[in-house]
Amino acid sequence: MSKEGVADIPEGYVLGSYRIIKKLGKGGYSCVYLVSRIADAKKFAMKIEDSNAVKKAINNEMTILSMIDCSYFPRLIEIGETREFVFYTMPRLGISITDIRRKMPHKKFGADIFIPIAEETLKIIHVLHTLGFIHRDIKPSHFLLTPNYYQSPLCLIDFGFAKKHLNLSTGAPYPKTSDNRFTGTKKYASLHAHNGMNLGRCDDLISWFYMIVELATQAVPWAGVSSHDLISEHKQNISVSVLCFGLPKPFIDIYKYLCTLEYEDTPEYDLLFEYLEKAKHLTNVENTNATWESLRSYDNDL
Ligand SMILES: Nc1ncnc2c1ncn2[C@@H]1O[C@H](COP(=O)(O)OP(=O)(O)OP(=O)(O)O)[C@@H](O)[C@H]1O
Ligand SMILES: [Mg+2]
């Protein structure tokens, strides 16, 4: 077994009560496969990690998914373990926002799409925060399209880095810890993450903002840079007007507001939704079922 992650598993391989059909995605430590439940041939997605992996993100993920059981996040169907693998199954969802963006003519969305995406993804992050958790790896490949009978057109996946953040009996964040490892994905990480600081709700929102910039403009200004230090320097020095070039003006206000937030702060989600309303108004955009049906048409399996 490769030290970097799960080796490819062949079609037809049986894992617990499921049969592997094909790979849906692959990350640093795990793989996601389309599987068929042997008992009834129903299709699911299965996330699999090498049971010898040093860092078992999947255990954290399964624990958190069992605590945030609602339709904005994948429902945990079954967990299992063999000598080689730890795995869980969840409903099979659609393609990610990244996958759809790459199918666009200029690899970017117009305001008619990126503003509804900003609104829906912010709603989902808000729900997660209200449940007392932070995600710590917000990025467009972690928002997947859902079938049209779901409560939300998108679902947030991958809770490998997620963490309980709020003590719900007091409503306050847990005290900071001395754990200062980098957490997340370089391209979308906040400066707090680059600096190894404890992350809060504000850091999920900064990553959300970088994600929206990418969806609206094709690439964040530091796309293609691989050094942590250079990316961090870029994020530190970039002016609001350069970062938000081409975005409706309320996004400048959103970014300025997000930059004022610290670990303990409860973000003013209502204010952010108001800015998005203004952006919709300015650009004559509506977030309707038709918006999401148009995106679902890019997914042959939904
Ligand atoms: N429930 C699902 N239905 C369909 N596809 C899925 C599902 N879950 C994950 N995927 C696909 O697998 C990819 C990787 O999933 P995930 O992010 O959970 O794994 P990962 O190992 O953490 O990957 P990475 O390191 O790239 O974040 C997703 O971007 C998506 O394309
Ligand atoms: Mg992931």
Image (cartoon, rainbow, N blue to C red):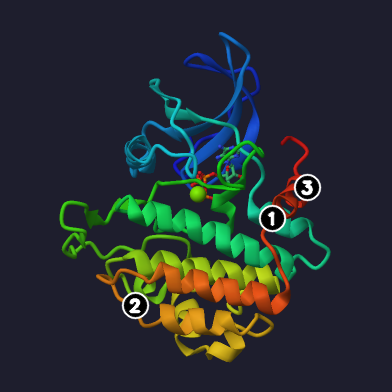
The answer to whether any part of residue 12 appears in the image is yes
Q: Which mark is residue 211?
A: none
Q: Which mark is residue 298?
A: 3
The local secondary structure at tag 2 comes to loop
The local secondary structure at tag 1 comes to loop
Between the C-alphas of marks 2 and 1, the distance is: 31 Å
Amino acid type, mark 3: Tyr
Q: Is residue 86 above or below residue 204?
A: above
Residue beneath disc 2 = 261
Could you tell me residue 268's position as x and y percent? 38, 71
Mark 2 in CB contact with mark 3 (< 8 angstroms): no
Amino acid type, mark 1: Thr
Could you tell me residue 172's position as x and y percent? 20, 62
What crowding class fits label 2: few (fewer than 14 Cα within 10 Å), some (14-19), or many (20 or more)? some
Residue at 66% in and 39% down: 148
Q: Is residue 238 above or below residue 89?
A: below
Q: Quadrant of residue 43?
A: top right
Residue at 50% in and 36% down: 6
Q: Is residue 231 above or below residue 298?
A: below
Amino acid type, mark 2: Leu
**Residue at mark 1: C-beta within 8 A of ligand 1:** no
Between the C-alphas of marks 2 and 3, the distance is: 37 Å
Residue beneath disc 1 = 288
Residue at 37% in and 43% down: 57
Could you tell me residue 278's position as x and y percent? 59, 77
